[in-house]
Image (tube, coloured by chain):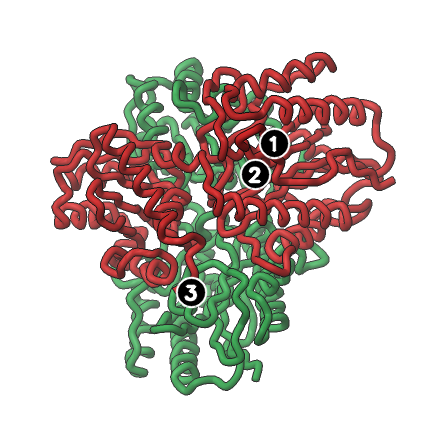
Chain colours: A red, B green
């Protein structure tokens, strides 16, 4: 068995919080489709979510149940904390066929377990849970009452415990190692893919003391014309002699992700880049000044907006989101967003990735921090100079 | 604009094939949710599919339309071949909110376009298309008639053209570079994460002539007890002095993936490992002898099964699948499977990743090839010794 990232008491606490919320909503079974939530509850970890995979949490004080591909139940026994009978594989002959579906089998399993007539909360917007899977599940459980339970677990995840924060600190060290490596290897004439090889190396092996996991978002290094588009992937393009490059890099430790974005400049810094960077760094100061328990998420954004408006700039997209346990394709938790209209009251233990990305016509600037809300204010988990790194 | 992977004629051909199939099924609009299919049709490429993203193909000879997050429309203009008016961003204030949904906006866009009463084929089992997204889309288009169109595009993808095969050849070179690197760096006492750093480096930068893309499946190196579970991720565990290690590695060029699995042995090869490897390699010979145009997919599997049965072995899971354009989490195309019951008649241009993985109690063996079906038989695109690589 692979060592669990947390003590069993941590999982018990998570289940207790989940069940309290289930009770409030009148649910007696929760079907968890979000892979990060599945890991959060059970410790299960594996690249197996390309076939349907669920975690069932009954309202009773019983173990949750992981169900996935038979081949991957072996991985469940190695990584999840439940008894072997609660790690269940659907048969291999149900994988990716048109004449049967894993959710048919899972519905039957739920019925046989005696849970077929329950009030079931289910995550309806989890990545990897399809409309077809849901149609087959509901058809197979005609007596169940279904209710949307999106974000039920995510909101519990939004407040981090001490051991979680320790992983986020480690993840931040890896993110810093990745940005350092990028500064070191990116230069005129270097291929993007050669830089990525080194950066990914720092992300997974950047610490002698612990491993880095795969990042939920691949490293983005946006140079040249790509800098106007925030999610373009690398290629064999060579960096130019004069180029502003936005870097958005993660570090991930035991699935906990920290984000760190910075900007570097090859050649002379254009005035508009320097001006925008100045405004953005000032904006980050405002974010860090505002962030504390009791403030509304939207008010953190307002503090930023006030600063950049003074510089004649504006930004349509949100400037941050809750971050934590993450699997591809997203490291955000889909709960707190720093943007107008988000009335979430920040509290101690929240961790947000505040990313100030300005994608202009043909160039862009990014500066971000992974920020822990503390009892008295906040603490940036990522610690790295914010200025544009110039390689002249 | 980033250079498209294919000439425009290739995209025209793809659209023609798709429209022929749409016509057969009585569809006058296709909503494509599968990210690999979206790329196949439009060239669009970006890590943006963590928010809803669709490609619309009307039956008329008009350009398809990409719709995704506003921020990512900039990436659409850089990577997709359509005119700017056919690269559409939904507003930033629709991202991950409970009070509105991108699919509400997309449904309205479709209505305004005059397509709201069409017979719409839609992919209902794409990875990033959720039950909630589908419920909002259908609610927003009450006059449309929806029909499941899963795999419509995938089946067209199953037959590769010459330019696609060229990318798969390049991808195979990267997969080989990755396995070579693994053989070089894996040794007793080395941390898994340090090996992964080097292996990923070979995957993305293993050729001086072209870049490797992110792999749809992360590299798996299954040593020690992990070898019994096929999809466990790496950690900071150190390789032992005596250990059988199964490697499953991809190479990806312009999103086209080739797979290559091999096994290495640290220390003395246990007899059971040597015996199983012998059976598996003989089984691969049988697969390659059988694979040719006109044979049924299940008959390829039968040829393998006959061989390993003679060695007293059996395998529950399929031994291969169609492979090609790929985004996480899967490099398989979900069409052809080499397994009992799959009556697909193989034809020239099919490419299958045949993976013979035997995951036993506490150890495992893997050998695979990426195989192109040719006019006369087949050709392995991956070319690498199949024997267990022993480091004594």
Give residue B227's position: percent from left, percent from top.
42, 69
Q: Residue at x 54, y 31 (%)?
A: A373
Instruction: Examine the image and state in which quarter residue A34 appears.
Output: top left
Quadrant containing the C terminus of chain B in the rendered view: bottom right
Pointers 2 and 1 within a single chain: yes
Lateral position of residue A188 relative to residue B62, left or right: right
Task: Name the element at disc 3.
Answer: strand
Q: CA distance from mark 3 to mark 2?
A: 27 Å
Q: Secondary structure at mark 2?
A: loop
Q: Which residue appears farthest toward the front when viewing the image? A: A376
Q: Are marks 2 and 1 in contact (CB under 8 Å)?
A: yes
**Image marks 3 and 1: residues in contact by CB distance under 8 Å:** no
**How many C-alpha atoms fall within 10 Å of the one at disc 1: few (<14), some, or many (≥20)?**
many
Q: Residues within 10 Å of mark 2 (few under 14, many from 20)?
A: many
Identify whether A170 is placed above or below A158. Answer: below
Q: Are marks 3 and 2 in contact (CB under 8 Å)?
A: no
Can residue B122 be seen in the rendering of this structure? no
Locate residue A102 relative to residue A158 in the image: left or right: left
User: Disc 2 marks which residue?
Assistant: B45
Pointer 3 or 2: first along the chain: 2
**Above or below A344: residue A197:** below
**Mark 3, other Cα within 10 Å: few <14 / some 14–19 / many ≥20:** many
Q: Disc 1 sits on a residue from what chain?
A: B
- Say which of marks 3 and 1 sits in front: 1
**Number of numbered callouts drawn:** 3
Identify the residue at image location x=72%, y=47%: A180
State which quadrant residue B112 falls in.
top left
Q: Quadrant of residue B308?
A: bottom left
User: To which residue does mark 3 refer?
Assistant: B354
Task: Choose between B259 and B270: the one closer to the eye.
Answer: B270
């Amino acid at each position: 068995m692979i060592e669990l990232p947390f003590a069993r008491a941590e999982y018990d606490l998570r289940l207790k919080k989940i069940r309290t919320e289930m009770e409030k909503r009148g649910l007696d079974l929760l079907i968890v489709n979000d892979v990060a939530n599945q890991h959060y509850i059970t410790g299960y970890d594996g690249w197996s979510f390309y076939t349907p995979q669920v975690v069932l949490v009954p309202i009773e004080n019983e173990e949750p149940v992981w169900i996935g591909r038979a081949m991957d139940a072996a991985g469940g026994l190695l990584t999840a904390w439940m008894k072997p009978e609660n790690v269940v594989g659907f048969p291999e002959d149900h994988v990716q066929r048109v004449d049967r579906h894993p959710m048919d089998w899972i519905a039957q399993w739920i019925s046989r377990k005696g849970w077929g007539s329950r009030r079931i909360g289910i995550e309806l917007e989890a990545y990897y849970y399809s409309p077809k899977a849901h149609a087959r599940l509901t058809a197979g459980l005609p007596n169940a009452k279904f209710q949307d339970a999106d974000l039920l677990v995510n909101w519990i995840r939004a407040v981090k415990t001490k051991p979680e924060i320790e992983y986020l600190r480690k993840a931040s060290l890896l993110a810093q190692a990745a940005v350092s490596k990028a500064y070191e290897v990116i230069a005129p004439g270097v291929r993007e893919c050669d830089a990525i090889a080194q950066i990914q190396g720092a992300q997974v092996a950047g610490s002698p003391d612990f491993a880095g996991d795969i990042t939920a978002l691949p490293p983005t290094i946006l140079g040249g014309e790509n800098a106007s588009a925030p999610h373009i992937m690398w290629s064999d393009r060579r960096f130019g002699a004069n180029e502003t490059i936005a870097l958005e890099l993660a570090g991930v430790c035991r699935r906990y992700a920290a984000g760190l974005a910075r900007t570097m400049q090859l050649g002379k810094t254009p005035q508009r880049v320097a001006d925008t960077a100045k405004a953005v760094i000032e904006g980050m100061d405002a974010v860090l000044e505002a962030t504390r328990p009791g403030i509304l998420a939207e008010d953190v954004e307002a503090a930023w907006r006030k600063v950049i408006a003074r510089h004649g700039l504006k930004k349509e997209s949100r400037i941050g989101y809750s971050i934590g346990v993450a699997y591809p394709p997203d490291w955000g938790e889909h709960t707190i967003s720093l943007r107008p209209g988000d009335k979430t009251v920040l509290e101690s233990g929240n961790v947000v990735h505040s990313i100030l990305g300005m994608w202009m016509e043909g160039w862009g600037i990014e500066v971000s921090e992974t920020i822990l809300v503390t009892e008295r204010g906040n603490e940036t988990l990522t610690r790295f100079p914010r200025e544009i790194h110039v390689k002249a």
